[in-house]
Image (tube, rainbow, N blue to C red):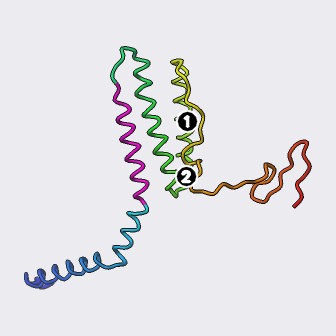
Amino acid sequence: MRPPVPRIARTILSVVIALAISALCDSPAFTAGLQTAASDEAPFLAESDTAMTRMMDGMSVKPTGDVDRDFVAMMVPHHQGAIDMAQAELRYGHNEQLRRIAQEIVVEQQQEIIAMRVALGQPLPPSAPAADQQKPASAPATHSHPTSHHGMQMNMPNNTREEQ
């Protein structure tokens, strides 16, 4: 049988453990790791929060007396919110399986928005590239020949092959 540990020894051991944990948490390596993780995720969290707020605000519609129109008025912002959150995953996520799911969400939700608007005879929004497919305004414009892509040659009908 083990002899009982005196109360003072347990107290001292508890203080030593608390100080060790405190020192570890204050170490530059530990805090840098936490700050990096937080700063890497900050843009994703900000975009997701904006998408959620916009979606929730958009889904608050005043009833018109037309159930179908009210349904579409609530569902379009709901679907757009899913698109916006999926695009944030595509910009910042690393898991390839989740990125594929996010791509599917974007396509499927866009198709459903269009189908609902068509069902009501509403005009469709103009076509535009997805937000994650647009080039930043600060990116320099690159000009390439229509038959070449990243230095590769492509055979186009009724055209001769480009000289390298």
Label 2 belongs to which residue? 97
The picture places residue 65, in percent across and down from the top left corner, at: 36, 14
The picture places residue 47, in percent across and down from the top left corner, at: 42, 49
Spot the residue most to the left: 7
Viewer-side label of 2, 1: 1
Q: Nearer the viewer, residue 7 or 55?
A: 55
Q: CA distance from mark 2 to mark 1?
A: 17 Å
For the record, the magenta segment spans: 41-61
Label 1 belongs to which residue? 108
Question: Which residue occupies 33% across, 23% down?
Answer: 62
Q: Quadrant of residue 69?
A: top left
The picture places residue 164, in percent across and down from the top left corner, at: 87, 61
Q: Nearer the viewer, residue 68 or 158?
A: 158
How many numbered discs, if any? 2
Q: Is residue 9 above or below residue 91?
A: below
Q: Are marks 2 and 1 in contact (CB under 8 Å)?
A: no
Amino acid at circle 1: Glu
Question: Which residue occupies 35% across, 35% down?
Answer: 57
Q: Nearer the viewer, residue 67 or 2?
A: 67
Please state if 114 lies on the left or on the right of 28 as rendered. right
The picture places residue 85, in percent across and down from the top left corner, at: 45, 45
Please state if 137 lies on the left or on the right of 163 as rendered. left
